[in-house]
Each structure stands twice: as structure tokens, then as C-alpha cells.
Image (cartoon, helix red, strand yellow):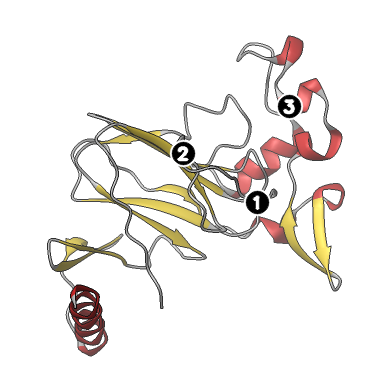
């Protein structure tokens, strides 16, 4: 089990592909496509989403903890690789390991929302973006898929979860406390042997790093 905590300034904009590299103005580099992508704009009101505009390789969700406002969970819990159109499929050893975007494969203005298609009126859902949206209703399926894909929250911690379900608890270590949230019971501290062991591990790690 591994974790990373990122502290940012009050106003920050960036994105995180599943490959674990944060993209922001201070950090150069980007995840290789196709990749599921978590995106943020952090300010007085935070905006966040999970985007499949660059393709899909793993389920990903973003869950706010202790926030104010709508604070819904964003993301894709389905495995889109199972229903990936053959022309978009990336395979290894005969198995589909990722699903490319139509823009990446065909590189046309229609699929890439550019040129005469570079605005919300002309860039409309396509067969491929609808396939993505059907599997992942709360993720961006194409560039102008805003109404059902972008979410807001304030004063929250955010947990990015890979390959999970919405019923699976997600946890944040904050202010020396392990706080968890799940769909059924809302925000609750979890207790039990496994979580006690995890807290002990976090305490030892923090103690070791301070030496």
C-alpha cells in the first residue's frame, strides 16, 4: 500500500493521470495517452472532474472529504476496456489494456473539437463519446461535455481512487486523523484491526521522516 499527499497553494490548477504524474504550471511533463485523467482547479470554490477525453486505461474516481457544497463523487467506476470499440482498442498479449480516444485515432476536427467544430454548438457527442459516456456517466467523454461532468466543492480534501467501486470506503490522513467516507454511511472514522495497523504504520513513517 502506498500513498502521496500533495499540498498546494490556495489557487492551483492541474491534472493527474493514472500514471501518477501531476500536471501543473510548475511541473513539466504529462502522462502518456490513453490515460484516465483527474483534473482540478482549486480556489475559493474548487472545480474537479475525471476526463476520458485522452482515452481510458483504468477506472478512476475523485471523492471530496469534509467539503462544503455539492461535493459529489466524480469519475468512472466501470471498466471501459470491456466494451472498447475495436478500432480504439490498445492490446497487449491479445488483451485490451486501454481504450484510445477517437481524436487520438482519427485526428479529425469533428472528433477533436477543433476548427469549425471548436465550440459547444458544433462539437456534439459522437458514437465513440456516447460509448464512453454510457459506461462512465459522470466523466468527460468529449471536450464540451460540461453539464454532467464537472463538479464543485469548497474546503475539502480530495481522494483519487483507482480501480474501485463507489461503495468502497476512501480515506484521507488529515490533522493526524484517518477519516473515511463510503456511500452507505457518509463521513465516519473507521475502526478495526486493519485500520489500527494502518494508523500505526503512518505514525511510524512520520516519526522516521522527522529523525
The residue at which mark 3 appears reads as 112
Quadrant showing the N terminus: bottom left
Using the numbered discs, state the Cα–Cα distance from disc 3 to disc 1 in whole angstroms: 16 Å
Camera-nearest label, 3 or 2: 2
Using the numbered discs, state the Cα–Cα distance from disc 3 to disc 2 in whole angstroms: 22 Å
The residue at which mark 1 appears reads as 56
Q: Residues within 10 Å of mark 3 (few under 14, many from 20)?
A: some
> Looking at the image, which residue is at 24% across and 75% down?
209
Upstream in sequence: badge 1 or badge 2: 2
Horizontal and vertical percent position of residue 149: 48, 35
Q: Quick check: can you spot residue 39?
A: no
**Residue 191, quarter of the rendered image:** bottom left
Disc 1 is placed on an element classified as loop
Q: Give 125 or 11, whichever is nearer the viewer.
A: 11
Disc 2 is placed on an element classified as loop
Upstream in sequence: badge 3 or badge 1: 1
Using the numbered discs, state the Cα–Cα distance from disc 1 to disc 2 in whole angstroms: 21 Å
* In this rendering, position of residue 65 left or right of residue 117: left
The residue at which mark 2 appears reads as 24
> Looking at the image, which residue is at 86% across and 71% down?
94
* In this rendering, position of residue 149 left or right of residue 79: left
Q: Give 173 or 126, whichever is nearer the viewer.
A: 173
> Looking at the image, which residue is at 73% across and 27% down?
112
Q: Establish if 192 lies above or below 24.
A: below
> Looking at the image, which residue is at 52% across and 53% down?
21
Disc 3 is placed on an element classified as helix
Horizontal and vertical percent position of residue 74: 42, 45
Quadrant showing the C terminus: bottom left
Amino acid at each position: 500500500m502506498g500513498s502521496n499527499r500533495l499540498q498546494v497553494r490556495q489557487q492551483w490548477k492541474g491534472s493527474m493521470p493514472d500514471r501518477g504524474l501531476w500536471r501543473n504550471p510548475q511541473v513539466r511533463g504529462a502522462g502518456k495517452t490513453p490515460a484516465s485523467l483527474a483534473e482540478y482547479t482549486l480556489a475559493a470554490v474548487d472545480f474537479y472532474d475525471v476526463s476520458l477525453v485522452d482515452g481510458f486505461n483504468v477506472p478512476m474516481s475523485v471523492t471530496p472529504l469534509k467539503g462544503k457544497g455539492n461535493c459529489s463523487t466524480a469519475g468512472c467506476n466501470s471498466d471501459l476496456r470491456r466494451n472498447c470499440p475495436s478500432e480504439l482498442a490498445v492490446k497487449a498479449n491479445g488483451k485490451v489494456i486501454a481504450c484510445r480516444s477517437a481524436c487520438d485515432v482519427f485526428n479529425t476536427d469533428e472528433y477533436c473539437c477543433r476548427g469549425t467544430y471548436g465550440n459547444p454548438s458544433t462539437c456534439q457527442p459522437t458514437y465513440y463519446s456516447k460509448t464512453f459516456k454510457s459506461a462512465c456517466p459522470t466523466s468527460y467523454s468529449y471536450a464540451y461535455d460540461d453539464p454532467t461532468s464537472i463538479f464543485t466543492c469548497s474546503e475539502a480534501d480530495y481522494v483519487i481512487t483507482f480501480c474501485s467501486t463507489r461503495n468502497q470506503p476512501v480515506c484521507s490522513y488529515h490533522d493526524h486523523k484517518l477519516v473515511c467516507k463510503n456511500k452507505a454511511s457518509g463521513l465516519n472514522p473507521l475502526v478495526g484491526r486493519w485500520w489500527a495497523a494502518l494508523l500505526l504504520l503512518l505514525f511510524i513513517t512520520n516519526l522516521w521522516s522527522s529523525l
